[in-house]
Amino acid sequence: MSGRFAPGTFTPAPGAGAPVRMLLTHARTEAVLTLRNGEQVLLTLLIPLALLVGLTYVTVIDLPQPRVDSLVPRVFALAVMSTAFTGQAIALGFDRRYGVLKRLAATALPRWLLVAGRVLGCLAVVALQLVVLGVTGALLGWSPSAGALVWTVVLVVLGTLTFGALGVLLGGSLKAEVVLALANIIWLVLLLAGGIVLTVDSLPAGMADVVRLLPSAALTEGLTDALVRGTAPAVSTVVTLLGWGAVAGLAATRTTKLV
């Protein structure tokens, strides 16, 4: 055995790991755990995919032709909300219940890396979702411009951070069972009456004024501006998303519990 390994190969080398490597490992773990969860896949991918294909051919709601062009921005907004808000809130709630966060906090991982890894993992899942939905949309006849895709990336990142902050606010402060029920109810309400399935302009005047202030409507309108109308998103869209994200983030830092 002598000479087979270089001197010092098995000598312990204690010390902190490289932050970037720890961050990528933690983000990959979070993304894989999400993709291995059947309920999460149903909520974040299969339902948006079914809505995209189904509503392209079934005219249960009025949409301008070609229908797929109007559906893609809405389905993208739904996918972001499903993963960053509903999925994140439920995962965080049950991680707290089973003591996962408490045990991670006791490891060598710094607190900022735990948060950043979770955010990065969420962005990776959203990116995978949009690739699958985008390819499906292209097969159905959707053909976006390069400029529209740039705005789409900006809005998706902003939307993911905003809905992620809202998900942490919900999942980090309530019991897991309450989070599970509330997150799904809010998801359903925002899907049906939050400016995603039905456009804000099709709602009654008083209700439309309220819905315009919701992050779901802002993200849907911003993506529609970019992908359908070929324009930059309105300033009010960006301000609405930033406002919700800032308020939710500040509230989450005060209310989030490890257990």
Image (cartoon, helix red, strand yellow):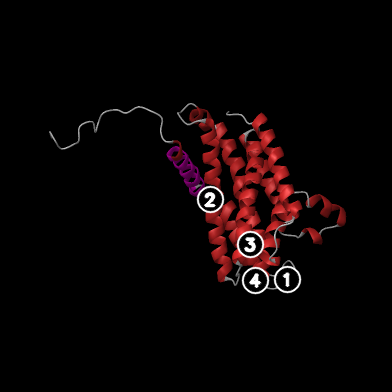
Of the two numbered discs 2 and 3 on the same chain, state the one appearing first in sequence: 3
Q: Amino acid at mark 4?
A: Tyr
Q: Position of residue 86 (x, y in %)?
A: 63, 45
Residue at horizontal 70 percent and vertical 63 percent from the top: 231
Q: Helix, strand, or loop for circle 4?
A: helix
Q: Amino acid at mark 1?
A: Pro
Point out which mark residue 51 bears.
Answer: 3
* Neighbour tally class for label 4: few under 14, some 14-19, many 20 plus, Cα within 10 Å: few
Q: Residue at x 46, y 42 (%)?
A: 24
Amino acid of disc 2 = Val
Which residues make up the magenta segment? 21-36
Give the residue type at disc 3. Leu
Q: Residues within 10 Å of mark 2 (few under 14, many from 20)?
A: many
Relative side of 196 to 6, left or right:
right
Q: Which residue is mark 1?
A: 64
Q: Is residue 166 above or below residue 103?
A: below
Residue under circle 2?
125
In magenta stretch: residue 208: no
In percent of the image, x 56 and y 42: which residue is there?
119
Q: Earlier in the sequence, mark 2 or mark 4?
A: 4
